[in-house]
Amino acid sequence: MKRDYTRLLAEMKSEYTQHAPKSAALQEQAQTVAIDGGHHAIRLLEPFPPRIASAHGAWLHDEDGNRILDFWQGHFANVLGHNPPVLTRTLSEALAKGWGLLTGMTDAVQIEAAELLCRQTGAKRVRFTTSGSLATMYAVLLARAYTGRSMVLKVGGGWHGAQPWGLKGVGFRQGFQQADSEGLPSVLTEEVLITRFNDPEALQAVFQQQGDRIACFIVEPFIGAGGFIPAHGEYITEARRLTAHHGAILIFDEVIAGFRFRAGNVGALYGVQPDLATFGKAMGGGMPVSAVAGRAEILDLVSRHQNRVKFSGGTYAAHPLAMLAARTMMQYLVEHEAEIYPRLAMLGEQTRRMLERAFEAEGIYARCTGYGNEAIPGSSLVAIRFPYERGRELSSPADVHDPTACDNFLTEHVLRLALLLENVHTMHGLGALSVEHTEEDLAFLEEAVRSAARRINEKAKRR
């Protein structure tokens, strides 16, 4: 049964203004110079975001002195938690020695980071840039140039950054068939085809119809913003078979998944090597670094002797401190893989089970996404969903983002603010666990969830 949250939201917004008055005042100040008071839309929750003064491990401190348990963890980048000493110490020592800011030159650390990334992912060549959006854009450019084709295939609900080929089929409008931004050339959006995640038959159908025109299929083996859902093994295997058969490039977008489930690419867990893959987030541990890695003959299109794809990466590509962070982070994850990833998987499993039980105890039916499968043994990404129908399968973005199937307003707006009033910060239904989250933190989360659920039950009107 659907609920009306109008009164509840109004009360919580008023209460939150009293809970964080300095952040409220800073929001008013920020809005005089920045659109909506900030520089990344997803961070600007209503009525205003907490303004953070410091962050360590699993916790944040805002300008009002509130201590906030955080599951956003730097856009899911902080596998080791906020500001881990293994990185902050290394970076501060480099700066103290007179090295680390941009020189516009090359250095040995770039080589070491590239060697590590290739070794851990099976890639033959890599080029670094600064964001996931740029990495996926360059990967698509490479695929189109290499194949001489124009069509780009992606899954509905898949987020591949704010780049031209990524800005269609993200939001659930007309079944993920619309562009998500104005200003895009119509011919470009017409060249982006949308298929359903975890549906091999739909994938087969689109390749049968358009296979000779498809330059690439870009897909997340573990879909992120689309719902924290792992790909079925048969789906990934079929994607590899179909792209190879039709001469298309298979791109794994591992900006979120890479180094989140193992010290390398998640594609290896499926036994599938893509033609290209994009990485970021966990690889850099909180520094701006991303990469396109894969087959040498495709990446060679950016080389000086071919010069067919303008993949320069930007002024801050391979920034010294970012490269130092990436090398340090990847090396640490490799050396501690046997302890880090089982712990993350265990924390994720405990959190999902606890959340479902806590809501059930308060009379709200909830189901989590983020569970592992036959390829991914465990996941540290967790999202809570509120299906209207018990037992509904949540295996694709369409299942979780269809407003007739799940109460997404409750997930993304009501619950998020209700938990922030309990000093818990979430994203997309919860977010990511880090190795710094503890059993005590999960107990704190459970109490916060039950308090938020009681508030929702008491104040939301059923209709």
Image: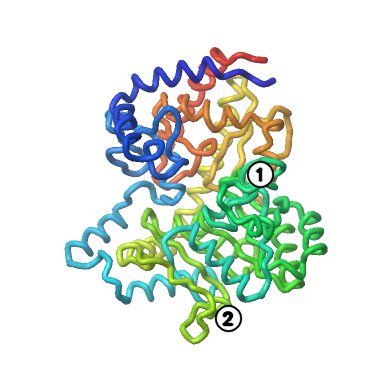
**Coloring scheme of the render?**
rainbow
x, y (%) of residue 117?
Answer: 46, 69
Closer to us: 346 or 53: 53
Identify which amino acid the numbered label 2 is placed on.
Glu
Please tell me whether residue 238 is drawn above or below residue 453 in the rendered image. Answer: below
Q: Residues within 10 Å of mark 2 (few under 14, many from 20)?
A: few
Q: Is residue 229 visible?
A: yes
Which residue is denoted by mark 2 in the rendering?
297
Sequence-earlier tag: 1 or 2: 2
**Residue located 39% across and 22% down the image:** 16
**Residue located 66% across and 75% down the image:** 148
Q: Quadrant of the N terminus?
A: top right
**Residue located 66% across and 59% down the image:** 187
Closer to us: 22 or 256: 22
x, y (%) of residue 364?
Answer: 62, 22
**Residue located 68% across and 45% down the image:** 176
x, y (%) of residue 7?
Answer: 52, 15
Query: Position of 29 compared to 186: left or right?
Result: left
Which residue is denoted by mark 1 in the rendering?
397
Q: Residues within 10 Å of mark 1 (few under 14, many from 20)?
A: many
Identify which amino acid the numbered label 1 is placed on.
Pro
